Image (cartoon, rainbow, N blue to C red):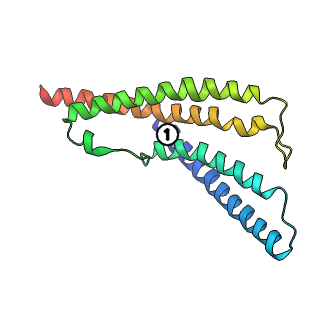
Amino acid sequence: MKKLTKILDKVLEVILSIMVVLMVFGCVWQIFTRFILRDPSDWTEEFVKYVLIWTTMLGVPYAYGKDKHISIGFVTGTFTPKGTAMDKIFNEILILLISVVIMIVGGIMVTANAAGQVSAALQIPMQVYYSGVPVCGVLMVLYSIPRLMDHIAELKNCRKEVQ
């Protein structure tokens, strides 16, 4: 499972890097066409908006997998090692449930509801954009399961140390 997350990290790093470059290109092109050519591009604003959405949907699981997400440690810093491990397990289970129920199931429903709609400027099916939510959910599950297993092992080690 650890090997899968390492591969996933590398793939997401490449994809996210490309997406950031594409957003910069889109913004520069919009500025160029608006101020130099005096004829603003029709597609760049929508393109950058949807690339940003997908960057977020892929960046959240990437940051979560790297343990770089925002967290508040002043409360959990007072826990015992066993309490910290139990808190981490609870959080992982909660994230797993949210990822499955809201992001995957809800995301598939929203994506299905978008059938037949196309974006205004790029004329791309809206399902392409909305599918970022269930993809994010699947990636969160793929990152969450090994983390949950690690935290369970950490809790077992805490119990062994107490005995």
Quarter location, residue 20: bottom right
Mark 1 neighbour class, 10 Å CA radius: few under 14, some 14 to 19, many 20 or more: few
Count of all numbered marks drawn on residues in the image: 1
The residue labelled by disc 1 is 3
Q: Residue at x 77, y 30 (%)?
A: 114
Amino acid at circle 1: Lys
Which image quadrant: the C terminus? top left
Q: Quadrant of residue 153?
A: top left
* Residue ID at (70%, 51%): 49
Instruction: Report the side of 36 relative to 155 (left or right).
Output: right
Q: Residue furthest toward the left?
A: 163
Residue at point 13%, 28% (across, down): 162
Pinpoint residue 132: horizontal percent, then vertical percent. Answer: 66, 38
Does 13 sit above or below residue 4? below
Q: Is residue 40 above or below residue 138?
A: below
Judging from the image, what secondary structure is the residue with disc 1 in?
A: helix
Judge by depth and name the residue closer to the eye, 49 or 154: 49
Residue 22 in the image: state x and y as whole percent.
71, 59
User: For this view, does 148 lie left or right of residue 50?
Assistant: left
Q: Residue shown at 86%/74% (left/top)?
A: 37
Which of 87 and 160 lies nearest the eye of the viewer? 87
Q: Is residue 156 left or right of residue 139?
A: left
Residue 131 horizontal/vertical position (percent): 69, 35
x, y (%) of residue 158? 20, 31
In the foreground, 74 or 14? 74
